[in-house]
Image: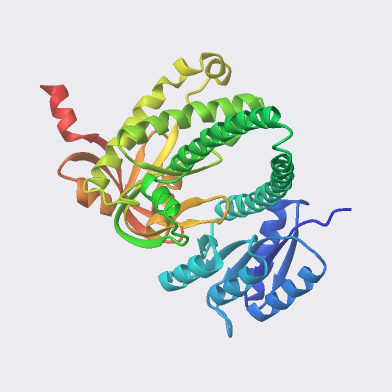
Amino acid sequence: MEKKPVIICIDDEDVVLTSLEIELQQAMGTTCRIELAQSGDDAIEMLHEYISENQAISVIISDYIMPGMRGDEALNKAHALVPSARKIMLTGQSSIEGIASAINHANLYRFIAKPWDRQDLALTIKEAHQSYLQHVLVEKQREELAARNKELEEWNASLERKVEDRTREIERERSELALANKRLDAEQKKTEALMQNILPISIAERLKAGETKIAERLENVTILFSDIVGFTKLSSRLSPEEVVTVLDEVFTLFDSIAERYHLEKIKTIGDAYMLVAGVPDPYPDHCATVARAALEMQERLKIFPELLPEIAQRLDTTIQVRIGVHTGAVVAGVIGQKKFAYDLWGDTVNIASRMESHGEAGKVHVSEEVFTLLKDTFAFEKRGEVDIKGKGVMQTYFLKEHLKESLKEIS
């Protein structure tokens, strides 16, 4: 029987390890094993043992501040032993130095702040575990392709030796090879186009030019998170194909808005959607542009019944999203060696996510920092002080409309 992949959790506090074990077992079920280590040294020793047993390690989660070996050091050493495992740093302190070290030397997959949100933790670990499985599958396919390419090279060498006796046959083979090269060139162009769809264009160009480690701090960034309200309940009333159809329509609509405003879509997780302005290149009007995009997303989502009338009629309800917006500084970089991903980390990301999760259906929930930047050009509704999980009491607002657009309508 094939061994299940292992997820290793590293923390010097028993209560944290126990909590991680319980939550990961609930999230992952029987798809993997959860193993615990109370220090970086224990984890490295455990890794050596698993390697000798040819045991797959899919995810390694490490606290940052620990006696002896720090979390980034443990992840760096683990990366040297199991480079394909997804490394995640879990800490109650924000350390740009530690994050950068783990990105540069351990191929850091994600950064999760303590105390974590259970749903965010579960989604992140599931995504990391699935990413590892996809990596293993791609590597297997790559090996098979390399074997086939080697066979083709040997066959071509054999044809070269017989060229004098089989001139006309070689010409035919050359013609076929030219066609294959043409197809290969077309596939390479498709690959480049796909990379530019997955990554920001400037980042894709830097990778193409030979850069292997991209991580930088950006000061002026505005982040938007959206989430479909009650999607889990709605999806229980739909077939799998219909669930995908709904998400495709909503996210395609959001993609068109992001493209029109020249914003970068970072990722989707389930029914959540994240975009940003100000990365990887400076965006002078980043906050106002994201605000206009957020208002348009809410407005255009009202046409959902017209896009999918049969599904909308069956649901007998409207599709609504919560949107959260915050502005500030982030760490941005490329993670992954085979399957690249451009991602953001830092307090700004966490607060933007909290603006969404603490928002209301059909509204754009923003922080006081956003209000301060845009109060002269946008209309807001003061929500008051809100107890934001993990951040404490914050003054927040609902974004209502763009004042210049409102004046045009009045005139």
The percent position of residue 262, horizontal first and vertical second, equals: 31, 38
Left or right? Give the position of 250 relative to 239: left
Query: Does residue 14 appear in the picture of this structure?
Result: yes
Left or right? Give the position of 384 relative to 120: left
Residue at left offset 74%, top offset 44%: 151
The percent position of residue 319, horizontal first and vertical second, equals: 48, 27
Seen in the picture, residue 408 relative to 25 is either above or below; the reply is above
State which quadrant residue 148 falls in: top right
Query: Does residue 360 appear in the picture of this structure?
Result: no
Residue at left offset 43%, top offset 39%: 322
Q: How is the image coloured?
A: rainbow
Seen in the picture, residue 354 relative to 187 is either above or below; the reply is below
State which quadrant residue 265 falls in: top left
The percent position of residue 163, horizontal first and vertical second, equals: 69, 37
Left or right? Give the position of 230 relative to 205: right
Left or right? Give the position of 232 relative to 385: right
| View extreme (left): residue | 411
State which quadrant residue 233 falls in: top right
Seen in the picture, residue 47 relative to 260 is either above or below; the reply is below
Residue at left offset 20%, top offset 46%: 374
369 or 128, nearer to the observer: 128
The percent position of residue 411, horizontal first and vertical second, equals: 10, 21
Residue at left offset 43%, top offset 71%: 95
| View extreme (right): residue | 1
